[in-house]
Image (cartoon, rainbow, N blue to C red):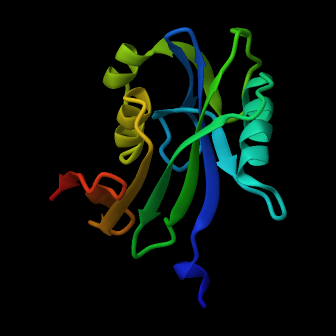
Amino acid sequence: MSMLSQKTIACLVYVQNNNDLLLLNRNNPPHVGTYISPGGKVERHERPMEAAEREVKEETGISISEPNLVGMLTETSNTDYNWLTYVYHAETGNRKYSSSEEGELDWYSWDELQSLPQPPATEYVSRLVRENRFFAIDAIFKKTGDSELELARVTDEVSGEVLKDT
């Protein structure tokens, strides 16, 4: 099996305090300049939930315990951009965060999130997390230029709903 066909396993954690989410304005690829919840790659011999707890602590300084699995995101392309992401939700009473090498952190309401730039498939994830719907999103990207990817199709495999189709 070639490396091109393998998926990177990751986690994403929607950390919430009351109606606010802790979001990162990314300064590292992929998706520089977009807002996303804390998360990252699952390390070898690490359970996805452990990775979620570790990534939130590393990126924000906030400790969470046993976040709730709320869905899965599969991103597929004919390039090396191929991810399988476990999506979690965690409540915290702590609004104090530390700085992150990944970008600037701040608290935003769910309503504010709708107007912020998000990675292409993540806007669909955010909507379903907010609606408190368990999901399995299948996001298919197509190459449009030398290095550009465009989100071509998004399907929620739990409900069967096609969320985007170009």
Q: Quadrant of the C terminus?
A: bottom left
Q: Quadrant of the N terminus?
A: bottom right
Looking at the image, which residue sits at the far right? 45
- Nearer the observer, 61 or 91: 91
> What's the residue at 67%, 47% (across, down)?
40
Counting from the top left corner in percent of width and height, residue 59 is at 73, 32
Residue 141 as seen in the image, left or right of residue 33 = left
> What's the residue at 55%, 60% (across, down)?
84
Residue 2 as seen in the image, left or right of residue 157 = right
Counting from the top left corner in percent of width and height, residue 89 is at 59, 32
Counting from the top left corner in percent of width and height, residue 160 is at 26, 57
Counting from the top left corner in percent of width and height, residue 53 is at 77, 37
User: Picture quarter containing residue 92?
Assistant: top right
- Nearer the observer, 69 or 7: 69
Decide: is 42 above or below 122: below
Residue 24 as seen in the image, left or right of residue 57 = left
Decide: is 72 above or below 21: below
Looking at the image, which residue sits at the far left? 166
User: Picture quarter containing residue 147?
Assistant: bottom left
Decide: is 124 above or below 64: below
> What's the residue at 73%, 10% (across, down)?
94
Decide: is 110 above or below 34: above
